[in-house]
Image (tube, rainbow, N blue to C red):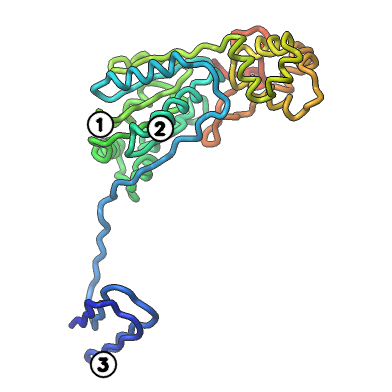
């Protein structure tokens, strides 16, 4: 037996049925249903709605050059009638993730259904497995309990992303086999993969390839200016260019040196150059300690520059 007040209900309601008293206390707005004994109650959750994840890390604060690469990414996205898949490769610390983030943030309005991100941990002791990544992605899309098998998770992920426009950054990938299960089916999506390897097998999946090289000296000095300031570098222009050369055109190394100089406003650039030319000081001052990821450890960058090295390289990391 039910008693229903379909109007707004304010105050206190009491119902007695067959010796059972049901009391509404406090304040209720909207429909109020009171019942005596209703037996077994089943509650069924509805399918996940259109959750809009925004998982991308912030766009890089320090960023110069790469205009050609950004233009090419824009052109590919405009030309593609199918899903855009791009592999950005290059040595560690060269700015692959920064390039990907700069483009994806700039193209955010083209992907209104959301942004997904994962660090695949290519250089971690245990790189991320596709089944666990799909569990993270499904959770971001509102699935509370993902299916148990990889194939089922792939199918559900494709279903939830079908005909929707997502951008997905698969950062620090180890292989094409690690990437393939994470590709959505929608032609409206864009997937950007970063890796120290070219991942050529993804070419059969229609991938486009961008190889990122170290910056030249001019662009390296410009990045230092963003951290240290133009007046200070102008006072020691030759030393600034030498610092850029010693850092091998690697943005991550330039950022570390720039931050160090910013903390020491009275330190001359010439003194920094002298210390970087000394092997012991280089090892002590350029210990980057995974400055680009908080989810999975990465090896620090290496370079072909004879003047660049770091403590992590001595621990057996590979470029």
In the drawing, what numbered circle is on residue 129?
A: 2
Q: Secondary structure at mark 1?
A: loop
Nearest to the observer: residue 145 or residue 285? 285
Tell me the SS state at disc 2: loop
Number of marks in picture: 3
Measure the alpha-carbon separation of dots 3 and 1.
Answer: 59 Å
Q: Residue at x 26, y 90 (%)?
A: 16
Mark 2 vs mark 3, CA separation in Å: 59 Å
Indicate which label's residue lies in the foreground, 2 or 3. Answer: 3
For this orientation, the residue located farthest to the left is: 1
Tell me the mark number nearer the camera, choosing from 2 and 1.
1
Residue that mark 3 sits on: 19
The residue labelled by disc 1 is 186
Q: Residue at x 73, y 17 (%)?
A: 282
Label 2 – label 1 distance at C-alpha: 22 Å
Residues 54 and 91: in front is 54
Can residue 315 be seen here? The reply is no
Q: Earlier in the sequence, mark 3 or mark 1?
A: 3
Q: Residue at x 33, y 38 (%)?
A: 112
On residue 290, the disc is: none
């Amino acid at each position: 037996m039910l008693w229903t007040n379909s109007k707004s209900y304010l105050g206190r309601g009491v119902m007695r049925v067959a010796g059972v008293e049901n009391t509404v206390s406090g304040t209720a707005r909207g429909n109020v249903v009171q019942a005596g004994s209703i037996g077994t109650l089943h509650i069924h959750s509805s399918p996940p709605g259109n959750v809009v994840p925004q998982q991308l890390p912030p766009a890089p604060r320090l960023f110069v050059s790469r205009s050609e690469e950004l233009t090419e990414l824009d052109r590919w996205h405009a030309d593609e009638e199918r899903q855009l898949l791009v592999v950005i490769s290059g040595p560690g610390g060269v700015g692959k993730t920064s390039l990907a983030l700069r483009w994806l943030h700039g193209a955010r309005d083209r992907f209104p259904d959301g942004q997904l991100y994962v660090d695949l941990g290519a250089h971690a002791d245990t790189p991320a497995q596709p089944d666990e990544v799909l569990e993270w992605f499904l959770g971001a899309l509102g699935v509370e309990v993902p299916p148990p098998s990889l194939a089922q998770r792939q199918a559900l992920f494709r279903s939830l992303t079908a005909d929707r426009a997502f951008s997905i950054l698969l950062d620090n990938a180890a292989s094409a086999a690690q990437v393939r299960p994470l590709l959505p089916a929608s032609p409206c999506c864009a997937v950007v993969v970063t890796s120290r390897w070219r991942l050529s097998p993804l070419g059969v999946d229609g991938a486009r390839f961008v190889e990122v090289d170290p910056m030249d000296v001019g662009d390296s000095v410009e990045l230092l200016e963003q951290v240290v300031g133009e007046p200070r570098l102008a006072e020691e222009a030759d030393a600034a260019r030498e610092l850029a050369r010693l850092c091998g055109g690697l943005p991550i190394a330039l950022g570390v040196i720039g931050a160090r100089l910013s903390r020491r406003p009275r330190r001359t650039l010439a003194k920094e150059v002298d210390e970087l030319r000394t092997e012991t000081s280089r090892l002590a001052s350029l210990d980057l300690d995974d400055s680009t990821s908080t989810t999975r450890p990465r090896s620090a960058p290496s370079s072909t520059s004879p003047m660049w090295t770091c403590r992590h390289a001595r621990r057996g990391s590979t470029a």
